[in-house]
Amino acid sequence: MSEPVYDASMPEGGDPTKVDVNAQYVGFEYHYIYIMICAFIVWLILPGIGLLYSGLARRKSALALLFQAWMVLAVTTFQWMFWGYSLTYSRDGGPFIGTLKNFGLMGVLVAPSPGSAVLPEIVFCLYQLLFCACTVMIVVGGAFERGNILPSMIFSFFWATIVYCPLARWTWSSHGWLYNLPALDFAGGGPVHIASGCSALAYAFVLGKRKDHGTVSLCKPHNTTLVFTGTVLICCGWLGFNVQFKFNPSTMVPREVFADSSQGGSTLNASVRSMVVIFNTNTAASTGILGWVMVDYIRHKRKFSVVGACEGAIAGLVGITPAAGYVSLWLAACIGFITGIVCSLLQNIDEWMGIDEGMDVFKLHGIGGMVGAFLTGLFATEQISSLDGFTFSGGAIDGNGIQVGYQLAEICAISAYSFVVSCILLYMLKYIPGLKLRIDEECEMIGLDQAQFFDEQIGDWSLMETSLSTTAPTIVGVSDGSWVSKDETRTEK
């Protein structure tokens, strides 16, 4: 049974009024059904990040982060349809950026996709859209509690365009320079995690520290239940997230015809390798928990932390992302465990750098992504990568020591590009008159929820204090006089 073949004369896959466009996929339906199910699962990551961030923040700014999860999905969907998909996955273009051949999703419908010939391009497009949206939402964490919402959405659109799209092109397009180096990145250690971590750090750097930086409550999550719930959704979504990888060359389509391929996003088919990827993903998350909890148990004198366990799970997931389809089961466990320990030991990295990045985005995604990318170069083995029948990629463990150098090149290139370009973009937005990248001091003290939302607030409302001059209720735990939460007591020095 021959697989579908892309025909450049029919970029949309044929005229459905004249031919049965489904016929080309007969016998291969299970591939795109599988990827669509994975896409539904990946979608859960967005509300998961919103809940996680909301729980980690103070209550007075928690609602804003839930709202931004929806807004990021909306903005990124528009950006991806407008020109994001074309800049990343157009079949022409260079090693650094694609073209506008598919501007406005022109020619994107049911033809075999650039990622896998057994997937209709519209399926591939949706799946990769969710990767972009999740990455942008991670970056937004760098602005929490003092970033103005409207400018953050403008930033999201342009960040996806000039940071994410080029990096995804470098890593996952057959034209990309990192792809051809080759750097091994199964599902986004570079374009997703290193890029989002470094960009969130840039966001926090440009905005500056929060007011009253150093208060006790500034570092305490307001709702551990939200943190746990968000982490559960993220872990569930990641099982679909890590099912991406490069296209299947068994399509027998010449490289010059089927010009583009995707090394990331997951296996993009229902091969045995995909099943190993899912097992490795769960394994790394579990050992990440063990590593982080072990450090916490020692640091806090035999006491546990639910938030620490959640962060450990995310650290393990970040670490395994670039390696999921390249390493054996026990080495996946080692990657999760090592990443969990490294990230936990860097608890005070924000203080060392003098940057108030309180969501730990850089620590978990930036550092965790770097650790995972480096360990991929050490532990990648052909025994696992070849489970799909055509990929033979090994690292130092297979005697291919140069792969470690390629991984370091990826780490340096992506971290430098994402941080520098994000800083430039943020400074441009910061000095646009009237845009106000950062909220004013009064709004920051009362919280984003009161300052930027009408008649909505996380938590209970209290009508204990009313007056003739106002009908707005008072929020429990917030003083009318100072706009500061009652639990915000300065640390003793």
Image: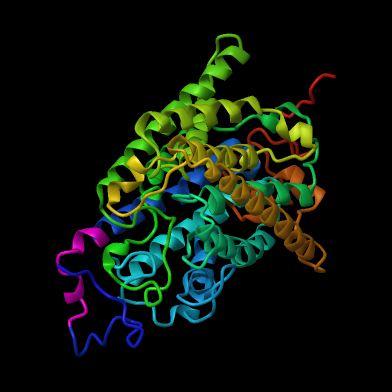
Question: Was residue 94 drawn as part of the magenta stretch in this picture?
Answer: no
The number of numbered discs placed on residues in the rendered structure image is: 0
Give the vertical position of 443 relative to 86 (above or below).
above
Rendering coords of residue 228 (x, y %): 47, 33
Report the front residue among 51 and 103: 103
**Residue 226 is at least partly visible in this image:** no
Figure quadrant of residue 359: top right
Rendering coords of residue 435 (x, y %): 76, 65
Rendering coords of residue 275 (x, y %): 28, 43
**Residue 127 is at least partly visible in this image:** yes
Q: Would residue 305 appear left or right of 384 to someone viewing this image? A: right
Q: Would residue 385 appear left or right of 206 to someone viewing this image? A: left
Rendering coords of residue 324 (x, y %): 41, 42
Report the front residue among 470 and 274: 274
Question: Was residue 21 drawn as part of the magenta stretch in this picture?
Answer: yes
Residue placed at 40% from the left, 40% from the top? Answer: 381
Q: Would residue 71 appear left or right of 117 to someone viewing this image? A: right
Give the vertical position of 44 relative to 434 (above or below).
above
Report the front residue among 45 and 318: 318
| Magenta part of the chain | 20-32
Q: Would residue 161 appear left or right of 7 to someone viewing this image? A: right
